[in-house]
Structure formats: C-alpha cells, structure tokens
Image: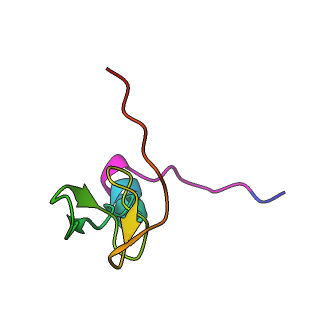
Amino acid sequence: MAVPKKRHNSSRTRRRRNHQTHARTALQKCPSCSEMAQPHRVCTHCGTYRDRQYKEIVTTV
C-alpha cells in the first residue's frame, strides 16, 4: 500500500475538505398553515400538499 512521503498541513487538508459540508435543507411557507416545510412534500404540521389533505395530524394536549 502506498504511503505519502510528507504530511499535509492542516490548511491544505481544510481546503480539500471545504466542499464536503452538508447542504442546508430548503424550506418554504406552507400555504395552508404558514409553517415552514420542505417543498414538494406533505406538510408535517397540517398534513396538506397542493391544497389536499393527505395525512391527518392528531394533536395531543
């Protein structure tokens, strides 16, 4: 197995890993409940998508 001759310094390592960060999740306002939700997905707060009720959300008090 190949072994590097010299050690990379920390700044070079950080430059190489700079693009490996996690992308932030895109969010938009739900038109029915105005909560932030992922686009093209059923809203986790009210259960609607494109003005249709897909999931019944039960709230416990």
Q: On the image, which quarter does residue 13 sit in?
A: bottom left
**Against 58, is 30 above or below?**
below
21, 30: nearer the viewer = 30
Q: Nearer the viewer, residue 5 or 52?
A: 52
Residue 30 lies left or right of residue 61; in this view the side is left
The residue that appears at 21% across and 65% down in the rendered structure is 32
Q: Residue furthest right?
A: 1
Q: Is residue 33 left or right of residue 20?
A: left
Q: Is residue 49 magenta?
A: no
Give residue 31's position: percent from left, percent from top: 19, 70
In the image, which residues are magenta? 3-11
Task: Identify which residue is drawn at 25% across, 65% down.
Answer: 27
Residue reaching furthest top? 61
For image coordinates 32% across by 49% down, the residue present is 45
Q: Please give the name of the residue rendered at 32% of the width and 76% of the height, measured from the top-left corner.
A: 51
- Of residue 21 and residue 11, the one placed in the foreground of this image is 21
Please indicate whether residue 27 sits to the left or right of residue 55 in the image. Answer: left
The overriding secondary structure of the stretch rendered in magenta is loop
